[in-house]
């Protein structure tokens, strides 16, 4: 009798549990719904661009000499800016990750300024820096007259404008990279006979190669997308300081929408290549 | 010989004051004490990895307090071993020797000798990924002993090993340190481990090192 009662109670309890079982479906519906809105927006943007430009117009635009020049300058300037960025970001990221020194927080904040500064302001600041006299001495004048290498409104200004923003992103990436590398190995290397420099070069740096490639790729991608600082500091002179981002602006300003869209699609393709490289490296853009 | 004279070490808010310790040449010493009392801090100070606020560290009667870790000629095996992820086992054994510009033949001969002594000859060409706890321990020990240091610092080297591997490593440690005559300071929580290995034992208690 008691057994029967127990069995019946357990059965009722199971039914009760089944009736009150909570489902994960609403969670996935809400999260998936919100996430898919953004993904859909990007896909629709790309589809709209693709639908707008025909293949013939795309080819015609890309074979225009000024766009070919812009493409070449973009590749060269982005590569130069990315290489300069990794050259600076590696030691700076390492110092910020490993050492507590006076003014570290200030340096950390200063490094982030180009990330938050409006691009036009950065370009304007570069322009002012190069043309502001310091006790009768001007940077631009010195480069132009003494070194015979003018910067402003020339291709070096494009590289410098791209570098100013791209480097900040590279520093962030390298700092995260070194944060994730255990400093104990470098300590042990020092007891084995390494100087700090040797420990950095022989132990830390070989472990950071993925981060370095990711930082270079991110810097390259950031440089590709720069427009504001280039427009102000380097200008948008055809066949001289024109890069793909300024081409879109120039083509739009003369009402040539087809060419603007064709160049935009080319930039999308370049961005996709960069993102695929990043994903293959397994580091992701989140770092 | 390791000698600490009235040593004060500050690590953030943690302070060790008036530490005195003496380990005779060729002696295998165990330093015991509860977690968080500063045993590792003392070991790092001897290795030159932690700045000393006051007092002196003498190695074989030479004051090395202000010397860089590279100049102290001290072999160090940290608790987490800190093997180099991009190195093969052989590169671990050869690293300190290359830094000392040994000839290729001497490096080759020393690394083979060490590998044979530690029973890792079959692992020489392997990377460190996939090594067992005992194998990793042997590689870290080999790396620390490769340049024939006069002092060996071991930070809980056996704590992460299973009992069988621990016993095996204890025998190996005893044999290797006796063979090389290296002065050893070994941090451990385990009284049995200290009894099995050490010629003398110290305990860090209330900020003071007491000989047991």
Image: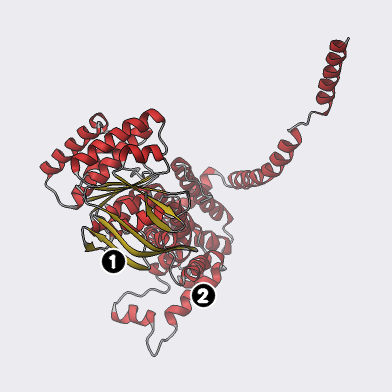
Q: Write down the chain letter for disc 2.
A: A
Q: Write down the chain letter for disc 1.
A: B
In the picture of the structure, the residue carrying the numbered disc 2 is A124
- Name the outermost residue toward the bottom: A136
Identify which residue is drawn at 37% across, 56% down.
Answer: B42
Q: Position of residue A201 (x, y in %)?
A: 30, 54
Identify which residue is drawn at 22% across, 49% down.
Answer: B96
- Residue A220 shows in the view: no
- Name the outermost residue toward the top: A1
**Numbered badge on residue A46:** none
In the image, is residue A112 above or below residue A287? below
* Left or right for B74, reference A209: left
Contact, CB < 8 Å: mark 1 with mark 2?
Answer: no
Snapshot quadrant of residue A72? bottom left
Q: Nearer the viewer, mark 1 or mark 2?
A: 1
User: Which quadrant does the N terminus of chain B fall into?
Assistant: bottom left
Q: Position of residue B87 (x, y in %)?
A: 30, 42
Q: Position of residue A161 (x, y in %)?
A: 45, 67
Identify the secondary structure beneath mark 1.
loop
**Residues behind callouts 1 and 2 on a single chain:** no
In the image, is residue A22 above or below residue A134? above
In the picture of the structure, the residue carrying the numbered disc 1 is B66
Identify which residue is drawn at 34% across, 43% down.
Answer: B83
- Name the outermost residue toward the front: B212
Identify the secondary structure beneath mark 2.
helix
Along the line of sight, the residue nearer the viewer: A235 or A200? A200
Give the colour scheme of this rendering: secondary structure
Please tell me how crowded label 1 is: few (under 14), some (14-19), or many (20+) other residues with Cα within 10 Å: few
Q: Position of residue A221 (x, y in %)?
A: 47, 54
Identify which residue is drawn at 48% across, 52% down.
Answer: B36
């Amino acid at each position: 009798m008691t057994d029967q009662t127990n069995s019946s109670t357990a059965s009722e309890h199971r039914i009760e549990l089944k009736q009150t079982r909570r489902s994960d479906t609403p969670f996935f519906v809400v999260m998936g719904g919100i996430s898919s809105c953004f993904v859909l927006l990007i896909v629709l943007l790309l589809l709209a661009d693709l639908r707008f430009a025909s293949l013939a117009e795309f080819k015609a635009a890309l074979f225009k000499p000024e766009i070919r020049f812009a493409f070449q300058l973009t590749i060269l300037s982005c590569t130069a800016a990315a290489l300069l960025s990794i050259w600076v970001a590696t030691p700076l990221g390492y110092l910020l990750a490993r050492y507590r020194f006076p003014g570290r927080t200030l340096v950390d904040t200063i490094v982030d300024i180009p990330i938050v500064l409006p691009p036009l302001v950065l370009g304007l600041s570069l322009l002012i820096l190069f043309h502001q006299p310091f006790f009768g001495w001007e940077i631009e004048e010195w480069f132009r007259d003494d070194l015979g290498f003018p910067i402003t409104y020339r291709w070096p200004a494009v590289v410098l404008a791209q570098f100013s923003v791209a480097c900040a992103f590279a520093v962030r990436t390298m700092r995260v990279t070194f944060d994730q590398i255990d400093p104990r190995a470098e300590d042990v290397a020092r007891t084995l006979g390494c100087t700090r420099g040797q420990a950095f070069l022989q132990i830390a740096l070989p472990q950071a190669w993925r981060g370095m490639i990711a930082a270079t790729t991110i810097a390259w991608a950031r440089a590709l997308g720069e427009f504001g600082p280039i427009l102000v500091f380097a200008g948008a002179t055809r066949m001289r300081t024109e890069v793909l981002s300024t081409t879109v602006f120039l083509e739009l300003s003369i009402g040539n929408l087809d060419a603007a869209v064709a160049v935009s699609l080319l930039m999308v393709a370049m961005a996709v290549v960069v993102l695929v490289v990043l994903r293959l490296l397994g580091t992701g853009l989140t770092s | 010989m390791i000698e600490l004279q009235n040593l004060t070490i500050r690590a953030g808010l943690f302070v060790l004051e008036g530490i005195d310790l003496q380990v005779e040449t060729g002696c295998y010493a165990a330093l015991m004490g509860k977690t968080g009392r500063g045993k590792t801090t003392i070991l790092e100070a001897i290795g030159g990895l932690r700045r000393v606020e006051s007092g002196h560290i003498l190695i074989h009667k030479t004051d090395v307090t202000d010397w860089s870790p590279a100049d102290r000629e001290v072999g160090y095996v940290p608790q987490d071993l800190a093997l180099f992820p991009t190195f093969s086992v052989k590169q671990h054994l050869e690293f300190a020797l290359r830094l000392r510009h040994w000839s290729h033949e001497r490096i080759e001969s020393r690394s083979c000798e060490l590998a044979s002594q530690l029973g890792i000859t079959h692992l020489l060409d392997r990377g460190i990924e996939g090594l067992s706890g005992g194998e990793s321990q042997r590689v870290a020990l080999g790396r620390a002993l490769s340049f024939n240091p006069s002092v060996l610092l071991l930070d809980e080297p056996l704590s992460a090993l299973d009992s069988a591997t621990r016993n095996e490593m204890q025998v190996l440690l005893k044999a290797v340190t006796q063979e090389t005559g290296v002065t050893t300071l070994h941090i451990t929580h385990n009284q049995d481990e200290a009894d099995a290995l050490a010629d003398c034992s110290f305990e860090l208690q209330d900020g003071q090192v007491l000989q047991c």
